[in-house]
Image (spheres, rainbow, N blue to C red):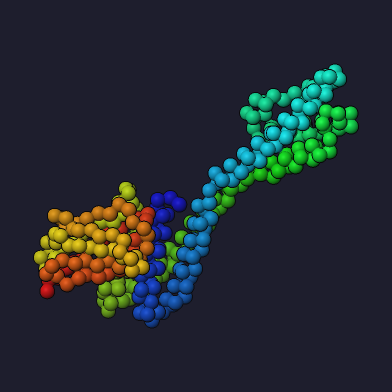
Amino acid sequence: MSKKLNSIYAMQRRVYHFFTKNKAFLMTLPLFETLYNSFESGLNQIAVLNEEYEKDISGITRNKENIKKQAFKMAMELQRRLIAFAKLNNNEVLIKEVSYTESDLSRCSDSTFLSSCQVIYKAGANNESSASGYGINPDLLTHVKTAIDDFSTVIDAPREGQIGKTQIYDLRESLLRENQNILSKTDLLIDTVKNTHPQIYKEYYDTRKVVIRSGSLMVKAQVEDAITGAAVIGAVVSFRLDGVLMLEKTSADGGGFNVKTMEEGIYEVTTTKMGYPPDVREIVIIGNELNSINIVLKKF
């Protein structure tokens, strides 16, 4: 996906986490359950398509080249025997028919290579009986034909793989647009609780922001005092993923810190500083978007 689509997808994943976390309340809103189920289905389909999209086309190309090498080897084996037979029997027509150099065949296009191999095979089949003493026999011809047929089967595989990727890209984009349409409807529902549930309202719209990353920074955090707004220096911030401590950072002179590399996931983030009660929260780390964290500590 493009950088913009990646950022939209990252936002939709965060919103899904917000929906899940606040599901008990949100389910009381009209039509939310239907919207939630459709949104979840769309994200699941996108996840499957992402796996398909990341399949390496270079592997398809390598497989095609290996099969081509086998066809080249078998065609050259038959051609050498035909040339020997033709020259020793002064068959100038056959010599001209199958006089391909290894250099020519190795550099020509796939379609020309395939046609040339088929010419060599046909010449071998036509001269099988008279050239049997040169090792041109049914067994050799069968191996040559099999190698040529195998290459014919995969000759367009890389191009077809790229076409498949384009189709997957288009389908993912369509699903993302559908999910954006769903969110435009949940926007209307969340707007109805702006005054009655302001925290839900603010968290939802903070989560709905699409931020396109321009660099490699993953997490940018700031720790502040709730009363003075001043930076809190020396606060220890711990990131736990599934209960396992993954990272600890200490806020610097300006109260902030940055993280360049983190595994994606839902983290429990605990901030401790002498004179303040611990701050514990959940955050979602998305690998392709800058994740901003603002931690506000209130003294005992």
On screen, 215 above or below 236? above
Q: Answer left or right for 4 relative to 125.
A: left
**Residue 185: quadrant of the picture:** bottom left
Q: Identify the residue at image location x=49%, y=57%.
A: 50
Q: Answer left or right for 10 relative to 198.
A: right
Residue 273: x and y, percent?
Answer: 15, 66
Residue 96: x and y, percent?
Answer: 78, 22
In the displayed orientation, state which residue is furthest to the left.
228
Q: Quadrant of the C terminus?
A: bottom left
Q: Answer left or right for 35 relative to 126.
A: left
**Residue 204: quadrant of the picture:** bottom left
On screen, 92 above or below 137? above
Q: Identify the residue at image location x=63%, y=45%.
A: 157
- Total tally of numbered discs in the picture: 0
Q: Is residue 27 visible from the viewing direction of this image?
A: yes
Q: Identify the residue at image location x=80%, y=27%.
A: 82
Residue 13: x and y, percent?
Answer: 40, 64
Q: Is residue 206 visible from the viewing direction of this image?
A: no
Please name whichever residue, 183 or 300, is drawn nearer the observer in this view of the structure: 300
**Residue 194: quadrant of the picture:** bottom left
Q: Identify the residue at image location x=32%, y=49%.
A: 216
